[in-house]
Amino acid sequence: MDTLHIEGDNAPTAFQAAAVSTGTLPDAERVRSFLNEAHVRYAGDLSGEVADYIPALAGVDPELFGLSLAGVNGAVTSSGDARVEFSIQSISKAFVFALIDQLVGHDTIRRSVGVNNTGLPFNSIMAIELNDGSPMNAMVNAGAITATSFAPGNNVESRWEFVLDGLSRFAGRDLVIDDEVYRSESANNGRNRAIAGLLNSYGAFSADPEETVDVYTRQCSVRVTAEDLAVMGATLADGGVNPVTGDQVVNASVCRDTLAALAAAGLYERSGDWLYEIGMPGKSGVSGGLVTISPGKGALGSYAPRLDPAGNSVRGQRAAHFLSGALGLNLFSSLPHPADRSTL
Ligand SMILES: NC(=O)CC[C@H](N)C(=O)O
């Protein structure tokens, strides 16, 4: 990652002069104008590659770019292709984690899934072996598949219903599966089946590994928009209450657990860089979606399909970086700060 220092970084800036209160989002006009500015800034960025290991993802228009910010007050502001649907992929991990944490509780999650970082790619098999069979964190495939194995039900359909219903409550609308992505991914998920088989050999699973991977593959194939991601993230920012529907989806303690797990591993082996630059929990997916959560304030959802080598949306990360500074979202900062201090 290159770091670009801007002169006068320590001097009081226009941002600081017009400092927003640190406990709330800036007013709607300011949010809209910075969201539009982020869109203009990064719409021409052609870096990265669209994921091609799932054939159905490879054919997507790489220029799609949507940004949306949902506040805990329920206001949703968007720019660009924020209503274009795409498969949620790994971002589902964050919300399924929350649903399972709500069910099994903080201690079981720590013991049976884990909350540390592997330092390795999202679908690493080596990480399981290096950690004596621990799935390590629900934001990588091993931990996500383990979390999904806790979904209640007697068969695939009833367990799937639990997951889809929960994801829909986070979004505040009935989400549906993308059949083409599901079929394409099912035909190419040998690695995830190997991960589940390996975890099962360590005795980590109470459910059938093949069925669990099927539910996991379905959850990754659910269609969402950048606006949905913003609302889903804002629900985690709002103590588990969907700020648009008013539905209490999970408890506030579950939101804390989820955001901690995201901070540790939401952007895989790049999670440290992400926290260092953006300063908020986030979760990416290989289709190009990204959700970034500012507890007590709201969440940013984005969609831009070109990815960095770790599988994280390039424009999405850059927009989140800019907006974190401009809107004063960084958890480690007490004031809004210049947003373009470095490049990701
Ligand atoms: N990083 C991702 O978004 C990966 C999700 C994808 N469904 C997989 O498990 O391979």
Image (cartoon, grey):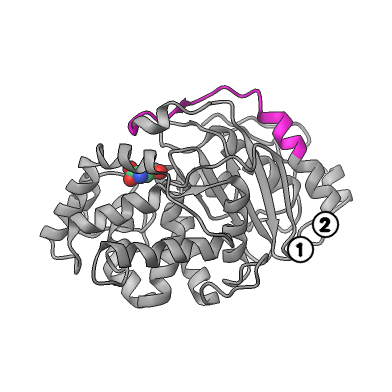
Please tell me in which quadrant of the rendered image residue 199 appears: bottom left
256 versus 315 height, above or below: below
User: Which residue in the structure is indicated by mark 1?
Assistant: 24
Q: Horizontal placement of 131 versus 285: left or right?
A: left
- Specify the amino acid type for callout 1: Thr
Q: Horizontal placement of 302 versus 90: left or right?
A: right
Q: Mark 1 near mark 2, Cβ–Cβ under 8 Å?
A: yes
The residue tagged with tag 1: helix, strand or loop?
Answer: loop
Q: Which residue is drawn at 57% across and 71% down?
A: 240
Q: Which image quarter has ligand 1? A: top left
The residue tagged with tag 2: helix, strand or loop?
Answer: loop
Magenta residues, as a range?
36-54
| Disc marking residue 35 | none
Residue 191 position in % (x across, y down): 22, 42
| Disc marking residue 20 | 2
Residue 283 position in % (x across, y down): 49, 50
Q: Horizontal placement of 263 versus 15: left or right?
A: left
Asked if the stretch drawn in magenta spans residue 26, the answer is no
Q: Which residue is drawn at 64% across and 42% down?
A: 82
Instruction: Say whether residue 9 is visible.
Output: no
Asked if the stretch drawn in magenta spans residue 45, the answer is yes
